[in-house]
Image (spheres, helix red, strand yellow):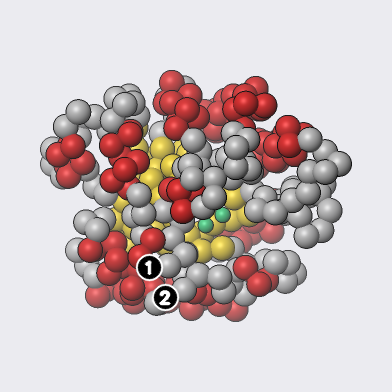
Amino acid sequence: MNLSLWYFLEMHDYHIHTSLCKHAEGEIEAYIESAMDKGITEICFTDHIPFADGFDSEHRMSPSDFNRYVEKIELLRGKYRHMTIMIGIEADYIEGNEDYLRKFLSGYPFDLVIMAIHFIKKWTDKQWVFSYEYTEQTLEHQYRDYFDAMIKGIKTGLFDVVGHLDIIKRPGYPVLNTNRTDVVSVLDAVQAAGMCIELNTSGLRKHVNSPYPVLEIVQMGVEKGIPFVLSSDAHKPEQVGDFFDDIFNELFRFPDLELAQYRQRIATHHKIAQPNLEY
Ligand SMILES: [Zn+2]
Ligand SMILES: [Zn+2]
């Protein structure tokens, strides 16, 4: 293992929120400064997509905020010219919202679109992946609903990256224990769609104390040749690049792992253990 390889690679954090989504805090500039402090030279803001019908409006920017989101980041791009600051979006796939997403995503030249499953169409109101009942259904059943929705989302072709792949997991109940076949189906769908998966460290800040997805799923993805991106899902400036050193040291166990770098939704891939020395 050679930890100095890390420094040959463009360090990126591709999943960062802003206070416009109403549950993140801090100025956009503070997130950029935090990335700089940690040696991260490439970041992508991916705040929660607005919904025209007001659905879940307490956790996302309103449609009228979207222009402010873009303008604020574009302005700061001019100030931080040595950083690559990209504009993306975390887009919820909820079965039936494909037309809305297609229209919204074609309205701006995003650098990256992360697919997130936060809500399941067939679940009752007030249930979402962070909080759901499983008194009447087994966890295995709930997990399967989630992965089925994820596969449908992947097949729409609307997204670049699968966000927080196993966020449905509850502490002590890893998805591979009960739903390995479903996870394999998700990975097959990702591979067929030519998408990437994010390795999202936000789970390490939470009770599950495990990244999304768990490293065994990363290994399964690497074996299928699926590229990954790194992300913190920062909701506070200091969370940018959270746990990246820890996670990166683990990733050296997977010499075939490829990290994807995005520009305007086009990915190029770089082997993690064979750094491009022009960096
Ligand atoms: Zn999310
Ligand atoms: Zn997020």
User: Which quadrant of the view contains residue 169?
Assistant: top right
Examine the rendered structure and indicate whether residue 74 appears above or below residue 241.
below
Callout 2 touching callout 1 (CB < 8 Å):
yes
Residue lying at 24% horizontally and 70% vertically, measured from the top left? 80
Closer to the N terminus: mark 2 or mark 1? 2
What amino acid is at disc 2? Gly
Count of numbered tags: 2
Q: Quadrant of the C terminus?
A: top left
Residue on which disc 1 sits: 237
What amino acid is at disc 1? Pro
Q: Residues within 10 Å of mark 1 (few under 14, many from 20)?
A: many
Residue lying at 50% horizontally and 29% vertically, measured from the top left? 217
Residue lying at 72% horizontally and 71% vertically, measured from the top left? 54
Q: What is the spatial separation of the Cα atoms under label 2 and label 1, in whole angstroms? A: 6 Å
Q: Residues within 10 Å of mark 2 (few under 14, many from 20)?
A: some
Q: In the image, is 169 to the left or to the right of 68?
A: right
| Element type where label 2 sits in the image | loop
**Camera-side residue of 77 and 8:** 8
Examine the rendered structure and indicate whether residue 56 appears above or below residue 5.
below
Residue on which disc 2 sits: 26
Q: In the image, is 251 to the left or to the right of 132?
A: left
Query: Where does residue 18 sit, x and y in percent of width and height?
Result: 47, 70
Query: Where does residue 30 sit, x and y in percent of width and height?
Result: 33, 73
Q: For residue 262, say whether it is visible.
A: no
**Camera-side residue of 162 and 217:** 217
Residue lying at 86% horizontally and 41% vertically, measured from the top left? 136
Query: Where does residue 111 sit, x and y in percent of width and height?
Result: 42, 55
Q: In the image, is 151 to the left or to the right of 122?
A: left
Q: Quadrant of the N terminus?
A: top left
**Camera-side residue of 60 and 70:** 60
